[in-house]
């Protein structure tokens, strides 16, 4: 496994772990906003429950995707062909996340799909 594949795996692990943590903060933030709105409007808590439910569903969905990305990075680091396929899929999805996701996605696709020549003096060429 070359250095670029290992860097790609590490990047996707870091993105997955940090993103899942950010989704936890998002869920807690929407819960706080719901309670703030309910308290300021004198509501009975239905608004808070709506915001908590909305935040939990959205954060849960994205946290699962980000956890899967971290797992794909771990599988790629171990040399699994399935991890390679899933990392390519997450790299393509990351292209939509401008600017950092785009940069990491382009680098990951280059590292995983590029045909780089063997080093000078390497056996087999």
Image (cartoon, helix red, strand yellow):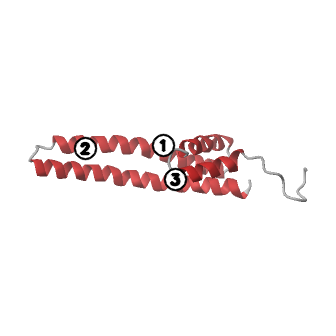
Tag 3 residue: 99
Query: Within the image, what quadrant is residue 60 found in?
Result: top left
Q: Is residue 79 visible?
A: no
Label 1 environment density (alpha carbons within 10 Å; few <14, some 14–19, many ≥20): some
Which of labels 2 and 3 is toward the front? 3
Q: Earlier in the sequence, mark 2 or mark 1?
A: 2
Residue 59 lies, in percent from the top left, at 37, 45
- Nearest to viewer (mark 3 / mark 1): 3
Closer to the camera in the image, 96 or 41: 96
Residue 15 vertical placement versus 62 (above, below):
below
Q: Residue at x 55, y 47 (%)?
A: 71
Could you tell whether 36 is left or right of 69 in the image? left
* Residue at image point 67% right, 45% down: 80
User: What residue sits right under mark 2 in the picture?
Assistant: 51
Which of the pair 106/10 is nearer the observer?
106
Residue 123 in view: yes
Q: Nearer the viewer, residue 114 or 81?
A: 114
Tag 1's secondary structure?
helix
| Image coordinates for residue 7, horizontal then vertical, percent | 64, 57
Contact (CB < 8 A) between labels 2 and 3? no
Residue at horizontal 59%, vertical 48%?
105
Q: Residue at x 34, y 40 (%)?
A: 57
| Mark 2 crowdedness (10 Å alpha carbons): few <14, some 14-19, many ≥20 | many
Can you give x and y, in whole percent of width and height, for residue 11 in the image?
Answer: 58, 56
Q: SS at mark 3? A: loop
Q: Which residue is mark 1?
A: 65
Q: What is the crowding at mark 3: few (fewer than 14 residues within 10 Å), some, or many (at least 20)?
A: few
Q: Nearer the viewer, residue 79 or 3?
A: 3
Discs 3, 1 touching: Cβ within 8 Å: no
Location of residue 48 by image quarter:
top left
């Amino acid at each position: 496994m070359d250095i670029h594949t290992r860097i790609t795996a590490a990047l996707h692990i870091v993105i997955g772990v940090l993103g899942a943590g950010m989704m936890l903060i998002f869920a807690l933030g929407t819960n706080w906003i719901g309670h703030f709105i309910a308290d300021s409007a004198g509501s009975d808590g239905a608004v808070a429950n709506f915001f908590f439910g909305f935040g939990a569903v959205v954060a849960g969905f994205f946290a699962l995707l980000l956890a899967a990305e971290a797992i794909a990075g771990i599988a790629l680091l171990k040399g699994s062909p399935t991890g390679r396929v899933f990392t390519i899929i997450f790299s393509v999805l990351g292209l939509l996340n401008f600017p950092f996701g785009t940069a990491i996605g382009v680098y990951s696709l280059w590292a995983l799909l590029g045909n780089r020549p063997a080093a000078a003096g390497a056996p087999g060429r």
